[in-house]
Image: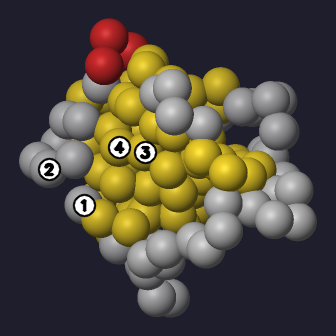
Amino acid sequence: MSVTEKFEDVVLHTKANVYFDGKCVSHAFVLPDGTRKSVGVVLPATLTFNTAAAEIMECVGGNCRVRMKGGSTWTRYAAGESFEVPADSSFDIEVADEPYHYICHYA
């Protein structure tokens, strides 16, 4: 899978979403067709994210390990890879060495 490098003609929400004392920062944006997405970075940490809507997390830089709610297995993801998270769920993410850069595609 290739890495998404840019989006054209978006409406960007300039106020950052800051989570976990600054360990995750993202910006939301909307495509011309109304599709919502966010782009952000997770700094080295182990965090738990809850989801309302289903999400596809696309790695565009760095790498991470992810464990889905109720799971015991960690799976590694790097640039060009993605993972899906169901709605009304959660996942643990571990970023160890360098920041993990992502695009969140909401369902």
106 versus 27 height, above or below: below
For this rendering, which residue is in front, 71 or 18?
A: 18
Is the residue marked by circle 2 packed among few (<14), some (14-19), or many (20+) residues within 10 Å? Answer: few
Dot label at residue 41:
4
Mark closest to the chain's N terminus, 3 or 2 = 3
Asked if one can make out residue 91 in the rendered structure from this viewpoint, the answer is no
| Inter-mark Cα distance, 2 to 1 | 6 Å
Say which element carries label 4. Answer: strand
Looking at the picture, tell me which residue is in the foreground, 31 or 48. Answer: 31
Name the side, left or right, on which 62 lies relative to 15.
Answer: left
The reply to whether discs 3 and 1 touch (Cβ–Cβ < 8 Å) is no
Q: Nearer the viewer, residue 20 or 90?
A: 20
| Residue linked to disc 3 | 40
Q: CA distance from mark 3 to mark 1?
A: 12 Å
Q: Position of residue 27 (x, y in %)?
A: 52, 39
Report, in whole angstroms, how far the alpha carbon at label 2 lies from the one at label 4.
10 Å
Name the residue carrying label 1: 62
Residue farthest toward the right in the current orientation of the protein: 33
Distance from disc 3 to disc 4, alpha carbons, whole Å, reads 4 Å
Residue placed furthest toward the top: 21
Amino acid type for the residue under numbered disc 3 = Gly
Residue 98 has which mark? 2
Check disc 3: other Cα within 10 Å, few if <14, some if 14-19, many if 20+.
some
Q: Do tag 1 and tag 4 residues touch (Cβ < 8 Å)?
A: no
Chain-order first, disc 3 or disc 1: 3
Q: Is residue 47 above or below residue 76?
A: above
Q: Are marks 3 and 4 in contact (CB under 8 Å)?
A: yes
